[in-house]
Amino acid sequence: MSSYRYLPLPSKGEYIRLLCLLPNESEAGPLQCKLHNYSLQTSGLRTHRYEALSYVWGNPRETLPIYVGKDRFLVTVDAICIDQNNSEEQGQQVQLMAKIYSSAHRVIVWLGEKAEDTDGALENICFAANERSMEHSKKETILNLLQRPWFQRIWVLQEVAAARHIVMMCGPIEIDGYAFCVGLKSLELSYAASPELQTLPSVTYLIERAGLRSNYTANSPEKFSLNTRCLAEPIDMFHTRKATEVRDKVYALLGMSSDNPDEAGLQPDYELPWKVLFQQLVKFVLGKDVSVETSDGSQRAVIKSKACILGQVSRARSDDRQNTLQASAKFIQERDIICFLQGASKPTIIRLYKDHFAIIVIAVTPLKESGSPKQVDLSKSITHFSRDFLLVWDWEQLLEESQDREESKNWMSFDQATNIWNVTLILEDLEEFEKAEKRLREAIKGYEIAFGEEQSILKSQYGLTPLLWAVGNEYINVVNLLLAKDSIDPDLKDNQYGRTPLSWAAENGHEAVVKLLRKHVN
């Protein structure tokens, strides 16, 4: 345990703590250091004469003794400058992170100690930057280096996005960040076989541009932000990255966003439960009309929303140089569905599973635009959202296709049957009639299981909604349950004949159903 007692940082002046390492004659001797309070507003417009370290949290069980004055620390090094037992201070310091790294004289990226499987990797990248050829086996050591934990962490993105000069270090070897990126480009490595490296080009792009950032920073009373893009875009690209604290998957990207976290209700607050933060994020990205269910023990959001279908992905490539969309954490596949959710500002790409759709890209953004007139017109011109979608946004791992191939069950809930029926209607809109036929029969079987009775199947009448089906078969209980669901529109017409449930019930003489429907029809 640490015996060091932190003194509160001054409330004004954007104060941080700087760690000053003291000299020692023995490399094996204990680390001696001092902590200094330091204001980021101290030195006017120039960058500050300190170095910022970008690296991965170590194993909390593997510690080194560090002495601050006469007090002894037994904590990992990166925990020193912020009082880790003070959640209020944590929230305040997190809001300064972009400015801390932006104001630093240089940022040192520590990739870890050298190891046999990465031996010579940084040197070989440097050789490649100088247009020297190398053996295939040496490329393997480079790929091994790129698999190190630093490249998978969420916080490092903002740290290199803010930096003005970057140095990459592995063991005793260091190279300039720009040379690192040039070398990787010249090697033309393929990342298609490693899904975790799919967004690596976005990381190297941030490192490469460090030298183009000005060495001058304005001291503004406004909250500092890199203003690189709207929050949905880095969330799409990087939400599967690792974080010790799950809330940091949101907070670590706020400094890169052009959106105001205060207006979005997303300002760093480590007292806020994760499930509440996740809900707020989803509603900020997709709009307040969506229904969101989350839990503290899961990085999965279950979303219900009305939407319309725009089309399907006709061609998908793993080569990032050929893509027309921003990189995403999950691979886009051919026949993925493009839809527009009610209340959203951008389309969403989804993939069908048994009774729901997995979100692949939550906010579609073409590479050469960020708010084009076409997208603005799209959000204003679409006014009819006829389909009900059950969506799952999983921040950890996308379900494998094989998990969708479940054998038919002898039990199915009413809600599951309704969800499958909604999938049927969406497949019909996409003109995938064979798949729609299969799902229709599953849904009908589900209703039969749920209510324990058989009915005369209304054969493949495309566009038939669950409510129309229940009305046509005069299932009073099913009609009651469906009308109780907020997502059911009692006036929705079928696609084939343009009939409403009320007109259909009246034509077939189902008087009890007619009375029930009249109570719900405006």
Image (cartoon, rainbow, N blue to C red):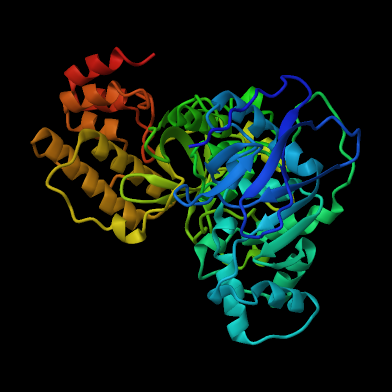
In the depicted view, which residue is nearer to us: 419 or 53? 53
- Image spot of residue 276 (x, y percent): 46, 27
| Residue 90 in the figure: left or right of residue 504 | right
Can you say whether 183 is above or below 427 in the image? below
- Image spot of residue 206 (x, y percent): 73, 54
Count of marks, rendered view: 0
| Residue 238 in the figure: left or right of residue 421 | right
Query: Quarter-wise, where is residue 71 in the image?
Result: top right
Query: Quarter-wise, where is residue 17 in the image?
Result: top right
In the depicted view, which residue is nearer to us: 382 or 86? 86
Report the residue at 39% width, 29% height from top. Answer: 492
| Residue 260 in the figure: left or right of residue 137 | right
Can you say whether 16 is above or below 512 in the image? below
- Image spot of residue 498 (x, y percent): 39, 34
Tell me, yes or no, if residue 382 can be seen here. no
Tell me, yes or no, if residue 205 can be seen here. yes
Can you say whether 249 is above or below 322 in the image? above
In the depicted view, which residue is nearer to us: 482 or 117? 117
In the depicted view, which residue is nearer to us: 185 or 350? 185
